[in-house]
Amino acid sequence: DPQKRAARLTFVIVGAGPTGVELAGTIAEMAHHTLPGDFRNIDTTKARVVLIEAGPRVLAGFADDLSAYAQASLEKIGVEVVLGLPVTEINREGVVFGGRLLEAKTRIWAAGVRASPAAEWLGAPSDRAGRVQVEDDLTIPGHP
């Protein structure tokens, strides 16, 4: 069924920083322009590329005009940009944001990471990012 095949070609990228923006653009270009001639049974031009950002704009660390330009460029090549809605769940079916599920088999996390509060729980020394500092043998200083 062509409709089901198209549904399976949904790519979701979470996080619209430099990594997410680059991935979304690359995937869209490949799906819509590079790959169509390579597949007989899959119409890659119907692939959905969805970039989800919890914040109000893509490339938040850049100037407003560059952010707007990047978003317009992505949308021009077929990337669906969703702003202001954090992802609340990623499961077997897809990605949940804004209280709804977007079915997708390919989900890419590009929103960055944050250290767990383990250093705080342990009363252990941590670096600026909150990561537990360890000795060469991976023990916590003062705790063999």
Image (tube, helix red, strand yellow):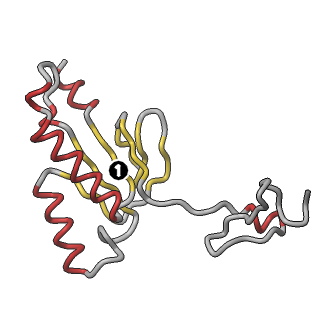
Query: From the viewer's perspective, is residue 76 above or below residue 56?
Result: above
Q: Position of residue 36 (x, y in %)?
A: 10, 32
On screen, residue 85 versus residue 35, left or right, reads right
Query: From the viewer's perspective, is residue 1 above or below residue 48?
Result: above
Q: Position of residue 21 (x, y in %)?
A: 28, 59
Q: Position of residue 99 (x, y in %)?
A: 42, 51
Q: What residue type is disc 1 on? A: Ile
Can you say which quadrant of the picture contains the N terminus?
top left
Q: In the image, what residue occupies the spot 20% across and 30% down?
A: 6
Q: In the image, what residue occupies the spot 35% across and 50% down?
A: 13
Q: Position of residue 38 (x, y in %)?
A: 13, 26
Label 1: which secondary element: strand
Which residue in the structure is indicated by mark 1? 13
Can you say which quadrant of the picture contains the C terminus?
bottom right
Residue sitting farthest toward the front: 136
Quadrant in the picture for residue 52: bottom left
Q: In the image, what residue occupies the spot 41% across and 55% down?
A: 110
On screen, residue 95 versus residue 120, left or right, reads left
- For label 1, the crowd category at 10 Å Cα-Cα, with few meaning under 14, some 14 to 19 and many 20 or more, is many
